Each structure stands twice: as C-alpha cells, then as structure tokens.
Image (cartoon, grey):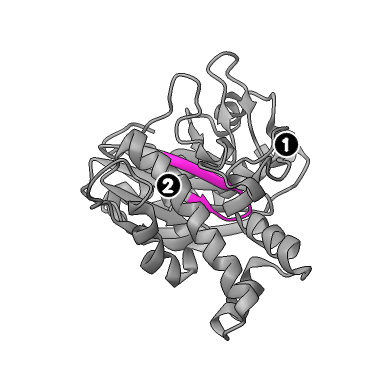
C-alpha cells in the first residue's frame, strides 16, 4: 500500500509518495495555477498520475489546503487560496481522480506528520503551529486530526493577542476583518510590520533575523517582542489543551533562538506551577505538510 500526499500552496503544489514505513518513494513539485479553480484540479490530477507512473501503483490520496471544508455546506472556507472558497473541492477531485480523497487544513497535516514520525512521534496530544506567511495551528490526537464541529480546531491565529499591552491595542487590521489577531503579530509579515512600525525600516523576517544575528539592536529588539508575543499566544494553547508537545513549522521555525527563549517566557504566562511541555522544530521541515497529507489515510486503508 502506498499513499500520495499533496500540499496545495499559494505558489507551488507538491506531491509525495510514501510507503507504509514512511519512506519516500517519489516527489514532484509544480507551480500552482493561482486564481484558476479548474486548472488547480487538473494540476493535481496530472501530479497524481505522474507520481503513480513513477512508482508503478495506485495509491490513496490526501490533500492539504490553506483552508477547511465547512461542515454546514461541504464547501471550502477560510482559504488563503481564495479561488477555492465556496467550491466542493474534495468532491470535484474525487471525480477527477476516480477515487475518494481526504482533505485537511495544512496545519492539521503538519500536526499529523509530526505526530506520526516527526518531532511529536509517540505523543498523545500534539499542537502544531505554522509561523510563515500566515499563522495556523493544528491538533493531532493519537496521530489523528482533530477537526472540530466547525472545522476550525486549532485556528489560534485568528484569536486576539492575549494580555495585550496598551501599545498593542487595538492591534493591526487582519484580512479576516478584525483587528489584533495573533497572526498579525507572530507571522512573518506580522514580524516585519512590527519592525517597520517601530524603526521605520522595511525589511522582511529573514533580513531582520540576519541583522539580529549580526548584533543589530533594533532587529534584536524586534525578535524579542516577537518571542514574547508568541509565548503569550502559546500560553492560551497550553492552558486550554495542555499538549504533550508543541511543534513549530513554517519559515520562522528556523529561528534557533525561539526554542531557547520562548519556553522560559511561556512558563510565566501558563496557569501552572511548572511547565514541562517541549517546543520543537518540525523534524521534517518544509516536507511536513505534504507528508501529513499522505498520512491522512491510515495504514491498511483502501485506495
């Protein structure tokens, strides 16, 4: 039995084939046809066909998207890839591929991947946070996705920044229509926007991290503010969910200082006398999402 995972991103779509032991058998990456729903379906169909031709067998297919299926309508909602919104994406893909597909939020795929054979392997409760262009979260219980009654379990990025200071109110405007969402503070663009507000310098998160590494005090102060806000955000997760492990993915997960400094700050905001929850980078890095999509089909599932 082999399983195909597809990670549908805003600019690229990646596919992978795993065997039952999690070994990678094939991988391909193609551009995402932005704004074109039917071309997106065709692209995924072609990608699956190429992967199966390369590995010589029919496989199950799981797909991670930056959004979710509405339990009320069965249509895509909350997607950064806006051309998917309001569409029966899983059903249309099932017709195109000639088999059932399983679809999940990309942060949930990260959680499943890391709970299966990554930084959260063996843990009963894994919270996975994506810190990249946006700020997503996913929950895996005993290795399975927790979707929730409204298909929004783990969506911490659109909760308000906890315990805001006066200078953090009401917070930046968010694309969801509200202000002060955690995403506007701790995502990559949120970090860059905070640096620009304070210093007047327009730099992306990578450049800010590089300047901080070189000893730039303004950049170092920006990263300190970011880590303290991240710690406050994660404290609400610990207080509510008390996960066995927190796994960080996305571009900002590569900031090593995050793992040294956030745990100590986090402990001060949690409603507990001790904090034993580890914070770890995703073991599979940028491949976690696509691997998690493949693992949406458990061992022994039919194609």
In x, y percent, where is residue 140? Answer: 34, 38
Label 1 belongs to which residue? Answer: 82
Q: How many marks?
A: 2
The residue positioned farthest toward the front in the image shown: 166
Q: Earlier in the sequence, mark 2 or mark 1?
A: 1
Picture coordinates of residue 13, whole percent (x, y): 61, 51
Badge 2 is on which residue? 234
> Pointer 2: residues within 10 angstroms few (<14), some, or many (20+)?
many
The answer to whether one can see residue 290 in this image is: no
Task: Assign a secondary structure to mark 2.
Answer: helix
Q: For residue 202, what is the image quadrant?
A: bottom right
Q: Residue at x 60, y 15 (%)?
A: 73
Tell me the SS state at disc 1.
helix
Secondary structure predominantly adopted by residues drawn in magenta:
strand
Instruction: Give yes or no for residue 177 being in the magenta stretch.
Output: no
Q: CA distance from mark 2 to mark 1?
A: 28 Å
Residue 164 coordinates in the image, percent (x, y):
56, 44
């Amino acid at each position: 039995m082999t399983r195909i995972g597809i990670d549908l991103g805003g600019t690229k779509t990646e596919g992978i084939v795993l065997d039952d032991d999690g070994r990678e058998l094939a991988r391909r990456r193609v551009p995402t046809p932005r704004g074109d729903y039917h071309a997106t379906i065709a692209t995924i169909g072609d990608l699956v066909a190429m992967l199966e031709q390369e590995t010589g067998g029919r496989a199950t297919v799981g797909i991670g998207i930056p959004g979710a299926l509405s339990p009320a309508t069965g249509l895509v909602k909350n997607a950064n890839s806006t051309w998917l919104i309001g569409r029966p994406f899983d059903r249309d893909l099932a017709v195109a591929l000639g088999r059932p597909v399983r679809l999940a939020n990309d942060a949930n795929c990260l959680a499943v991947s890391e709970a299966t054979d990554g930084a959260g392997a063996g843990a009963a409760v894994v919270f996975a946070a994506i810190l990249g262009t946006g700020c997503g979260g996913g929950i895996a219980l005993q290795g399975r996705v927790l979707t929730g009654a409204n298909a929004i379990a783990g969506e911490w990025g659109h909760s308000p920044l906890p315990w805001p200071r006066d200078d953090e109110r009401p917070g930046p405007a968010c694309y969801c229509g509200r202000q002060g969402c955690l995403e506007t503070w701790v995502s990559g663009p949120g970090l860059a926007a905070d640096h620009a507000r304070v210093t007047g310098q327009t730099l992306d998160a990578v450049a800010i991290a590089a300047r901080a590494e070189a000893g730039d005090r303004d950049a170092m102060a920006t990263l300190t503010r970011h880590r303290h806000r991240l710690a406050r955000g994660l404290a609400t997760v610990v207080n509510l969910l008390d996960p066995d492990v927190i796994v960080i993915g996305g571009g900002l997960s590569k900031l090593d200082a995050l793992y040294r400094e956030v745990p100590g700050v986090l402990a001060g905001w949690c409603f507990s006398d001790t904090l034993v929850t580890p914070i770890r980078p995703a073991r599979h890095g940028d491949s976690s999402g696509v691997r998690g999509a493949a693992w949406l089909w458990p061992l022994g599932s039919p194609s």
